[in-house]
Amino acid sequence: MSKRTIIRLSKYKNALYRLKKMGFVKVFSDNLADAVGVTPAQVRKDFSMFGISGNKRGGYTVAELVEKLNKILGKDKVQDVIVVGTGHIGTAMMNYRGFEKENIRIVAGFDIDPAKYNADEKIPVLQLDKMRGYVKEHGIRVGIIAVPDIAAQQVLEIMVSAGIKGILNFAPINLKGEEDTVINNVNLGLELENIIYFINTDKKGVINEDTDA
Amino acid sequence: MSKRTIIRLSKYKNALYRLKKMGFVKVFSDNLADAVGVTPAQVRKDFSMFGISGNKRGGYTVAELVEKLNKILGKDKVQDVIVVGTGHIGTAMMNYRGFEKENIRIVAGFDIDPAKYNADEKIPVLQLDKMRGYVKEHGIRVGIIAVPDIAAQQVLEIMVSAGIKGILNFAPINLKGEEDTVINNVNLGLELENIIYFINTDKKGVINEDTDA
DNA sequence: TAGATTGTTAATCGATTAACAATC
DNA sequence: TAGATTGTTAATCGATTAACAATC
């Protein structure tokens, strides 16, 4: 399954929350397509790939659809996540509102700088040395890397050796991992450079991923 | 030109900086392909689309190539950028190292919270009310939105009406703009959700954009 | 020259969209 | 029933890759 498909699934899910709040009980592929900015055919295709079916005449039931999407996206159980590097980006992730309602829980931060340590906060910041043990002990499977590029590959290796399977990397370097590790590199500098290219060129409009970014 | 192509161009440029530092004077499409993780054919195709040519037998001259890429990417002149919303993500962008050497300059932050104002810093944080005037006066063309989702569309409209052409949006909502506005939506929550899907599924490996988000 | 690499064309691959039979 | 919407197949579109003639 491609990343793009999964991103769309997440977007459908987010759109459905909004539609639900607006009182919708049923939706048609048209509604979702409008909300997310794709074609109705795309919506139906995406659903059919995951065996989600609606009613030939009555569309899809919002509540059912949300539940199915959440199941597929693994959002039916809480996912614990650690953050390594508690600079601005790391802290931003630790304080990100909205993770909670998505069943994502940031459980700890790690840093090499002793000045950052604070074991008493709701989300404790611990010594980097402790990361390995913490991950093993708590069975953490997802980590966020928000350290300088120079340290990123090394942090990755510690994470992976401790058992982490999925990594969101903000260090401006393309991390490479083993076959069974999922790495999602997000390079904020590139995203900005990209915009600069497009405003200096005739090509305009929304340049959303891909993003596959 | 697709976003993916431009992102690759930026990656070639970054790789070339590293290769230059390592003493390379010439590179072959093979070297760049390895560095960026694409095929050599992709590299040559990308270059040929922008009229960049090498030597049939001697590859490409690093210094020349860097210069040509920077020209295409609009990095030959300084680009001034403002940030709206000085929470964690906004602050992270204001403090992002490496923008300077990319000729990107964050010139001001804006916030609605008076507690954030600080006109004396190197990068001043000003009242949101002042944003419109500031953008017009300084001819700013690029802005970063790092406000809560509820405020994002409104901030976008002020930005656009003041003359901003390109926007990097971190608010978790798909912003829509006019034909001649470039909007790049980066949704950090979706990126993390994505990883969670893939670690709970057989599909593994690097799931770089698309980037796509 | 012989060998290696570019630049480009054609083939392939994958993702999106159009279209329409099935059916509620 | 008539009309509307799904689910899926086939067509299209775009991007990547293979292959190779040109040539340094």
Image (cartoon, coloured by chain):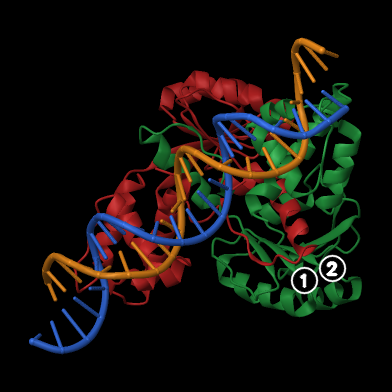
Chain colours: A green, B red, C blue, D orange
| Disc 1: CA contacts within 10 A as few (<14), some (14-19) or many (>=20) | many
The residue nearer to you, when weighing A33 against D2, is: D2
| Residue at 46% in and 22% down | B163
N-terminal of the pair, mark 1 or mark 2, is 2
The numbered dot on residue B145 is: none
B94 sits left or right of A31 in the view: left
Circles 1, 2 touching at the beta carbon (< 8 Å): yes
Dot 2 amino acid type: Ile
| Residue that badge 1 annotates | A164
State whether discs 1 and 2 lie on one chain: yes
| Residue at 50% in and 51% down | A190
Judging from the image, mark 2 belongs to the subunit labelled: A
The numbered dot on residue A140 is: 2
Q: Position of residue A191 (x, y in %)?
A: 52, 47
When the figure is inspected, residue B126 is found, relative to residue D18, above or below; the finding is: above
| Disc 2: CA contacts within 10 A as few (<14), some (14-19) or many (>=20) | many
Q: Name the image quarter holding the N terminus of chain B.
A: top left
- SS of the residue under disc 1: loop
- SS of the residue under disc 2: loop
